[in-house]
Amino acid sequence: MSRSGTSARRPATSPGATWSVPVEATARLLAGTRAHDVPVSRLRQQVNACTQNPGTTGQFGCYGNMYDPTLDSSGRIARITALHHS
């Protein structure tokens, strides 16, 4: 996930896809089934921890690295929310 710039050309559902998340975007992570608003910088930390060392994620869980992006009218990510699944 990059800090700014253009989005990758491949679909976000493909393995290894990258998304451009603007600094002004909002993020929501899960602690159990409860959602918490967090800065995008914390989302980045969580994604990195979940993909590199899942035992170091702190209060938030890793749920298969599934996220639901909400886009603005320009197609940029305005909000990204972690999804819970079992």
Image (cartoon, rainbow, N blue to C red):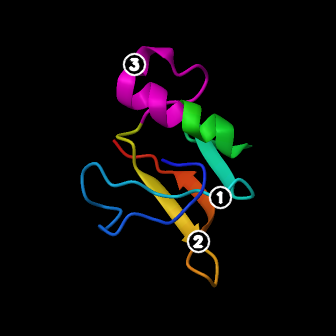
Q: Earlier in the sequence, mark 3 or mark 2?
A: 3
Q: Which mark is residue 76?
A: 2
What distance separates the C-alpha of mark 1 from that of mark 2? 8 Å
- Upstream in sequence: badge 3 or badge 1: 1
Q: Nearer the viewer, mark 3 or mark 1?
A: 1
Q: Residues within 10 Å of mark 3 (few under 14, many from 20)?
A: few
Name the residue nearer the viewer: 30 or 79: 79
Q: Tell me which amino acid carries mark 2.
A: Arg
Q: Where is residue 13 drawn, in percent x and y?
A: 30, 61
The residue type indicated by label 3 comes to: Asn
Does residue 60 show up magenta in the picture? yes
Judging by the rendered image, the residue that carries numbered circle 1 is 22
Q: Indicate whether 20 appears above or below 31.
A: below
Would residue 70 be seen by someone viewing this image from the given angle?
yes
Single out the residue that lies furthest toward the front.
Answer: 5
Q: Where is residue 38 in the image (x, y as percent from the top left)?
A: 72, 42
Q: What stretch is highlighted in magenta?
A: 46-62
Amino acid at pointer 1: Pro
Q: Mark 3 points at which residue?
A: 53
State whether residue 68 is above or below residue 42.
below
Q: In this view, does 21 lie to the left or right of 52?
A: right
> Which corner quadrant holds the C terminus?
top left
